[in-house]
Amino acid sequence: MSQKPQETALSKCPGCEEPLEPGDLFCGACGYDLSAVPEPPRDHPTIAMAVPAENGAAAAARTPTGHPAAVRSDGPGGPGGRDRSGGQDGQDGSGDFELAAPGAGPAPGAAPQAVPGAGPQAVPAAASGASSAPSSAPSAEVSAPAPDPRTPAVELPPAPPAGTKLCVACRAGRVDTDGYCENCGHAQPRERDHMEQELESVAAVSDRGLRHHRNEDAFAVSTTALPDGSPAVVAIVCDGVSSASRPDEASAAAASAANEALLESLPRGTHPQQAMHEAIVVAAEAVNSLAREPGRAGEHDPHRHQNAPACTLVGAVMAGGLLVVGWVGDSRAYWVPDDRTHPPARLTEDDSWAAQMVAAGLMNEAEAYADERAHAITGWLGADAYELEPHTASFKPDRPGLVVVCTDGLWNYAESAADMAAAVPADAQLRPLHGAQVLVGHALDGGGHDNVTVALLPFAVPPQGAGSACGDT
């Protein structure tokens, strides 16, 4: 059914607020269609309507909540200057509003007044008692302002393809392969900045530290079974040599290769100490292969000296009641007994300038480690290593304890065995991951000058007599 456009009672255009002439159907300034204002919902009336009551008495005008409605007065002498019940203006001539009293309302046939703020098209309908009388007045509904036709529609940016990594800062830009946002340039947190892993009987934590721009440490922890079905636990920790190229890749390659070699040889029945030696050799070959990759020497940092990728390695294996450690470089392993009345021990010897000075009797330990050359390593994994000399040692502990496998980022803040034992939480045997987290926090609290990585292996065996070192190569 077709409908005629409603006559407007607006004084200003809802679109541009320019003055309107009586009878305008369109705004002369912006062309706004004055008849296209949508009707509001009909379940919240805002205009007090005169309701005919029995015996000719008008009902009170009320709001939907049941309270008397405020109606607009045109002032004394005007069409609405007096209350339709015969009284004077409700505010002694100084106000513009009057409150319809209960039981008193506009006389039959009188037009109700508009509610202030009801909108630009609040036009009352006829309130006569004749229901069949036609009305030329517009609907007594309040229209919500229509959208401004001059405002362009906002186009949302297209959704990024599935799997796209978005910037953690602006949440909009795509992260490029170099780890920076293409939109705001913000450097993204690297996955290796902080890593944690916990298995049933081993846990490890690695952190970038507070001074380095990336984490050049790596670790691998795993469990397997020997041919007789008894468990074997493996922990490998590697520290990339910062003066070499791509140290982060070197440490990751070495840790992964050594771990995989042990998981392959231990189930075959290879003695754990021999398996550790072979794993270090495999790790060295993995690091050497990085130097043979064409076009990769200076890809990450063009200002770094083009030395071959290099790293240190320390590992521990618990299998068949034995504790086997292996190492190259200055990463260390410590033994911390559960009963702290027994002394702890350091299980490795550094491949470093300071260690060589002490071993040669040229300096005592305090003098050697106070020298600026103390941490210069003399052994590492890498294509430019002087000679690969894997060190391995086998122990048979006589009481439960904890093995701490770590990089120098931790032991720099707990160098002696007693200092390391003091830093290890008392419940680390039962909560190795928590213990590793506490040790990393100890290094960060001390300054965090280097990357920090530590793995804890609880050695939970009943006492079996005196413990002794079974061999060292």
Image: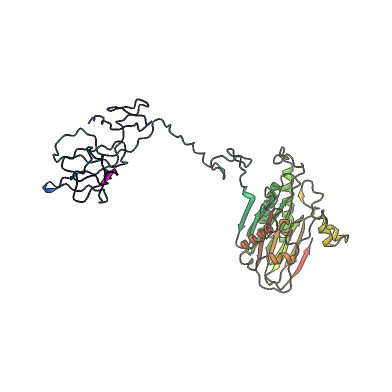
Q: Inspect this view and state whether residue 225 appears.
A: no
Indicate whether 31 appears above or below 207.
above
Residue reaching furthest to the right: 362
Most foreground residue, 437 or 18: 18
Q: Is residue 191 magenta?
A: no
Which percent across, then down, holds residue 72? 27, 42
Q: Identify the residue at image location x=66%, y=58%.
A: 440
Q: Is residue 91 magenta?
A: yes
Please state, as top left, top right, bottom left or bottom right, where the N terminus lies in the image: top left
Most foreground residue, 66 or 411: 66
Which percent across, then down, holds residue 434? 61, 62
Q: Which residues are magenta?
A: 87-103
Residue 8's quadrant in the figure?
A: top left
Please state, as top left, top right, bottom left or bottom right, where the C terminus lies in the image: bottom right
Residue 132's quadrant in the figure?
A: top left
State the count of labels. 0
Tell me which secondary structure the magenta stretch mostly adopts.
Answer: loop
Residue 199's quadrant in the figure?
A: bottom right
Which percent across, then down, holds residue 391? 77, 58
Which percent across, then down, holds residue 419? 73, 65
Residue reaching furthest to the top: 28
Q: Identify the residue at image location x=30%, y=42%.
A: 116
